[in-house]
């Protein structure tokens, strides 16, 4: 079980992709983003 207490869903990844494709993420570059529910 992930640290957030639930199994990840496809929407969790889709929301991250949508954010990264938006203007809001315009200053993000060369980062590793762990979409893992807080599990290290």
Image (spheres, grey):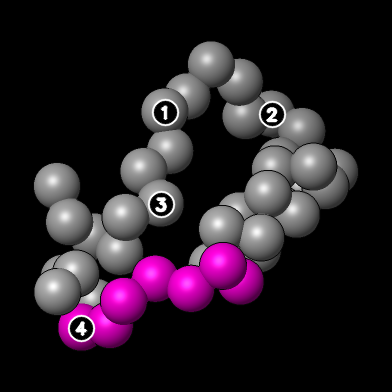
SS assignment at label 3: loop
Task: Determine whether label 4 and label 1 are within 8 Å by CB.
Answer: no
**Sequence-first disc among 2 and 3:** 2
Picture coordinates of residue 36 (x, y %)? 32, 55
**Sequence-first disc among 1 and 2:** 2
What's the magenta region? 5-11
Which quadrant of the figure contains the N terminus?
bottom left
Picture coordinates of residue 4 (x, y %)? 24, 76
- Residue annotated with mark 2: 27
- Crowding near the residue tagged with mark 3, few <14, some 14–19, many ≥20 C-alpha atoms within 10 Å: few
Q: Mark 2 against mark 3, which lies toward the viewer?
A: 3
Task: Provide the major secondary structure of the magenta segment.
Answer: loop
- Residue annotated with mark 3: 35
SS assignment at label 1: loop
Which mark is drawn over residue 32? 1
Residue at 66% x, 60% y is 14
Residue 30 painted magenta: no
SS assignment at label 4: loop
């Amino acid at each position: 079980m992930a640290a957030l207490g639930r199994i990840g869903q496809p929407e969790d990844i889709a929301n991250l992709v949508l954010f990264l494709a938006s203007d809001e993420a315009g200053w993000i570059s060369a980062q590793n983003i762990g979409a893992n529910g807080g599990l290290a």
